[in-house]
Amino acid sequence: MFNLLNKGLAAVYSGGPPTKDGDSADMPPVSSRSSGDAMKPATAAGGLPKVQVGVDVAQKKEEPDDGGFVGLLRAQAQETGASSGASESAQTQGEKPAAVVEPNIHSSLPRRLPERILYGDLCNAALIGNHDVVEKLLKEGEDVNERDKDGEIALHIAAQEGHSSIVDLLLEAGAQVEAKNKDGDTPLHNASREGYVDIVEKLVSAGADVESKNQKGDTSLHLAAERGHFGVVQKLVDRGTDFTIKNFNGITVLHAASDGGHTNVVDTLINAGIDVNYKDVNGESSLHKAAMNGHVGCVDRLMRAGADMVARNDNGHTVIHCAAIGGHVGIVDMLIKNNFDIEIVDEDGDLALHKAATEGHVEVVDRLVKAGSDVNAKNNYEYTPLYNAALSGNFHVVEYLIAHGSNVNEKDGNGNTALHEAVSRQHAAVAKKLIAVGADITEKDVYGSSMLFNAAIWGNVDVVDSLIKTGADVNTKNKGDSTALHEAAARGYVPVVDRLLGAGADVNAKDKYNHSVLHKAAFGGHADLVSTLIRSGANPNAQNNDGDTPLHIGSCMGHVGVVKSLIQGGADPNVVNEYGGIPADDAEDEEIRALLMSMMSEPETE
């Protein structure tokens, strides 16, 4: 019976035996059908009902009807139309009674995966809403509190699926109204989460604890408020539920409703007298939640109910910081209209303008600037809004702030400007804009690196071009005496090397360790670039502080191509370094060693 039962239920879900791909052979996917269609027996082209219980029709007559669950399913499938009392689905199709429940955006189809049918006849019958089968199983002595793999009893399932009359049957049969599943949810949690007002009423009347918490510390009221189920919230509040209870993250039901933007629920809770200034474990009030998510109506209600407008969360953010971070123009407008202090700072010293600039919300930036926010204000790190926008690559905000008076050459606490950040973060469009409006290209960072140096490090050809055209010194050195050409060569950025050489970069420049540009290219294994540099005049036998030539470096690193390029360019394999070693001594690669030794063994010619 177990296998047949599961086949029969599978047929109810799919409308027929599953095909190879898992879809019904005769019907569209369940997602394209109403809950009512999902529960009705499928019909053939001529309108006769198909008998779909997971067995061939020809074999059906030879099988004895065991009078159990499968038999009932088979009998219902053979009827032309479902009896009005045959199943809960024929009465309400799992939907909420219109008189007591607001519309629910969630699917009215069973929300459990099809594999759920493998766990217990009673749970399965409750899942699909089959009133007659539930009744029959209970009369036959089925355990009303049998649990499935998720720790749920049939009452959990019926409550979640909205099968009101089945809830009645199960309660009458002694179902444990306080049973908890693996997540700590009771049937009341399930019904509240899905918004079934009538079932909530039945469970509460049956003794359900309205303040029972699940493993997250949520009560049924939390779940209803989170989903915006006004009717359930009203019912639970009217029943005297403690709406001040916090879950394990310090979230109250007002937090949950505000976070979801459910204005009517917020109104109900405010009218019931809830404290609008409760904070969660992150120091956030309901006002923070509503502002961060752009719920203008909730912010308005909370503000009029006396919410602390300058309350800070653990990051020091006020309501206007939250609105600015989220890019919520409507809330920013409301706050400005109500004379909110737009110059209030968070723990980092950021204005709302800093936050909006960082996030790229140009409309919010516009509102704040027009309301008088200082475009050159600095935070605790001496970052301006322009600096933040450049750092984040927000071109339109950069453009706006420049047009409204931002100083493009303001420095942060480390001496960096917005251009430094744009170049270092590879925001080419922003960097070019800053250069075009007069950003100082000669400024160096704390390491003495120029704008051109940093652009070369990242291989930004467009920025390199812009800087060169604006007059950047291609041979300026950082504190380690490296030039932009050193850095581009080390990383193999051929286009950047070409631009720098074309602009007059010194191909034989050396850093403080006497590494030449060719040393850097050899170390990086860039054979083609080595050839380019030698053709441009690089000395293939230049020695660093250890007496190593580029050939020593290439040999030691095992770069065969580099060694060949150096030899072709005139590198001397006999040069001895400060430790008495020649390039072949450092070569672990057999091909390199053989190549170098063969050159050394060639007799000298007059």
Image: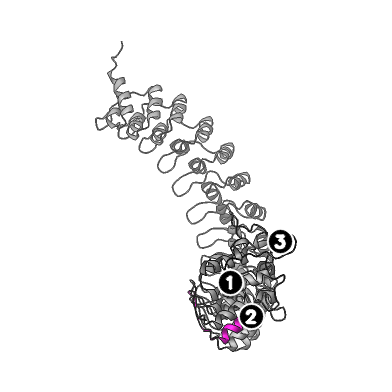
- In the rendered structure, which amino acid carries the disc numbered 3? Ala
First in sequence: mark 3 vs mark 1: 3
Q: Residues within 10 Å of mark 3 (few under 14, many from 20)?
A: few
**Residue under the image location 57 percent in, 51 percent down:** 409
Residue 173 on the magenta span:
yes
Identity of the residue drawn at 41% across and 34% down: 525
Q: Label for residue 44?
A: 3
Say what amino acid the circle numbered 1 marks. Answer: Asp
According to the picture, the residue beneath numbered tag 1 turns out to be 65
Q: List x then y, in percent, for residue 600.
A: 29, 20
Query: Mark 3 or mark 2, which is nearer the start of the sequence?
Result: 3
Q: Earlier in the sequence, mark 1 or mark 2?
A: 1
The span from disc 2 to disc 3 (Cα, nearest Å) is: 31 Å
Rendered image: mark on residue 219: none
Q: Is residue 387 above or below residue 534?
A: below
Observer-side mark, 1 or 2, equals 1
Give whichever of 573, 369 is nearer the camera.
Answer: 573
Q: Is residue 259 magenta?
A: no
Q: Where's residue 144, x and y in %?
A: 52, 81
Return the residue found at the far front.
62
Which element type, helix, strand or loop, lies under badge 3? loop
Tell which tag, 2 or 3, sits nearer the viewer. Answer: 3
Magenta-highlighted residues: 166-183
Q: Residue at x 56, y 83 (%)?
A: 139
Residue, disc 2: 164
